[in-house]
Amino acid sequence: MMKPLPVYSLLPLTLTRGKGSMVYDADGTPYLDLYGGHAVISLGHADEAWQQAIADHAGSLGFYSNSVHLPVQYAAAEALGRIAGREDDHVFFVNSGAEANENALKLASFVTGRSKIVAFHGAFHGRTSLAVAATGDPKLIAPVNQVHDVIHLPLNDIDAVHTALASHDVAAVIIEGIQGVGGCAMPTDTFLRELAEACDRTGTMLILDEVQSGCGRTGQYFAHQAAGIVPPIVTMAKGIGNGFPVGAMIVSRSIDVRVGMLGTTFGGNPMACAATLAVVQGIEQHNLMQRAIERGEQLRAGLVDTPGIEEIRGRGLMVGLVLDGPCAEARTALWRDHQVLTGNASDPRVLRLLPPLSITEAEIDRAVTALRTVLEMRS
């Protein structure tokens, strides 16, 4: 019997449905989802308006390519521009975060005529060719990816950035608003401002990867907005579609993008754009960015002084708990004994929490109780 190739180490769980912040296994056992399938679930599982939006387009025009005008694509673009504060810019819809980053790096090279890329230690930008080269994790890089000219620098080291950009031959600097796989490590606001200034001065394209940290998760639509910068290119995916495969790249109107530079068959299809539009509307109608702030503060307050937690990273509902040892045992105890699902990171000490933005106060209380119980027993 044909089976899917193994992608990740699997938990011994078979999930069959979800609702809100809960998912259910084949036996009907409910689990509190503090991970959202890698920060994908923003509105909540099986959101009714999201379901209806996709179903409506599946029943009318499920697909056509970008060779015609698609009204829902324009509506989704307008909604993204409004919520992101980028109304005067352009958007290129794709299917995933990796595809968004791949096209962003390619576009930067087109525009600058340069070929070098600067990225940062601990970053994860995807598994396509340029994106994985910029990721810099040796475990992910095949020999064919090593042909790309990528410089990896320490996060928050502006002197290293100045040295790398001094030759004026770098096409792009790519950086996450908050590192996801890297364990919620954060660029400081000062570093982001100085990085933006250095890129402007040297004609280097700054790309903000908001695939995991965007879509309202940190309490602003993009994490980098806390620094007050407006990068020429921003990429996003995951929470933008609430589970429907959608990615996007916002491009400043000042960048000259000519027909033929970019292309996609499935990107921007009607059902994907309907999902995107439903997510933006849901975030606005239910004030989910403010809820992300409030529930994030509640989570942090509940975990203060918990034995075994050395640091609480992140903003809003993008949280990395740095433990005093590997988190694998705690993660197992959480799902097995308390029916709470969490994530991990490239740093084995970091427990990553990325719940739906719609998570309730009572559900955060349950999460805090489970986390404290498990970590206190572990210490």
Image (spheres, rainbow, N blue to C red):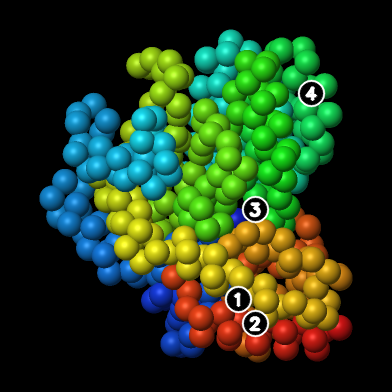
Residue located beneath label 3 in the image: 180
**Residue 203, horizontal then vertical, whole percent:** 63, 15
Residue 161 can be seen in this image:
yes
Residue 6, placed above or below residue 66: below
- Which class describes the residues within 10 Å of circle 3: few (<14), some (14-19), or many (20+)? many
User: Under tag 4, what secondary structure?
Assistant: helix
- Whichever of labels 2 and 1 marks the residue nearer the N terminus, that label is 1
User: Under tag 3, what secondary structure?
Assistant: loop
- Whichever of labels 3 and 2 marks the residue nearer the N terminus, that label is 3
Alpha carbon separation for disc pair 3 and 4? 25 Å
Classify residue 148 by image quadrant. Answer: top right
Observer-nearest of 196 and 120: 196
- Which class describes the residues within 10 Å of circle 4: few (<14), some (14-19), or many (20+)? some
Q: Residue at x 78, y 58 (%)?
A: 347
Alpha carbon separation for disc pair 2 and 4? 42 Å
Residue located beneath label 4 in the image: 162
Residue located beneath label 2 in the image: 368
Residue located beneath label 1 in the image: 298
- Which class describes the residues within 10 Å of circle 1: few (<14), some (14-19), or many (20+)? some
Q: Residue at x 65, y 49 (%)?
A: 178
**Residue 238, horizontal then vertical, whole percent:** 48, 52
- Which class describes the residues within 10 Å of circle 2: few (<14), some (14-19), or many (20+)? some
> Type of residue at label 3?
Gly
> Type of residue at label 2?
Val
Residue 211 can be seen in this image:
no
Q: Residue at x 67, y 17 (%)?
A: 201
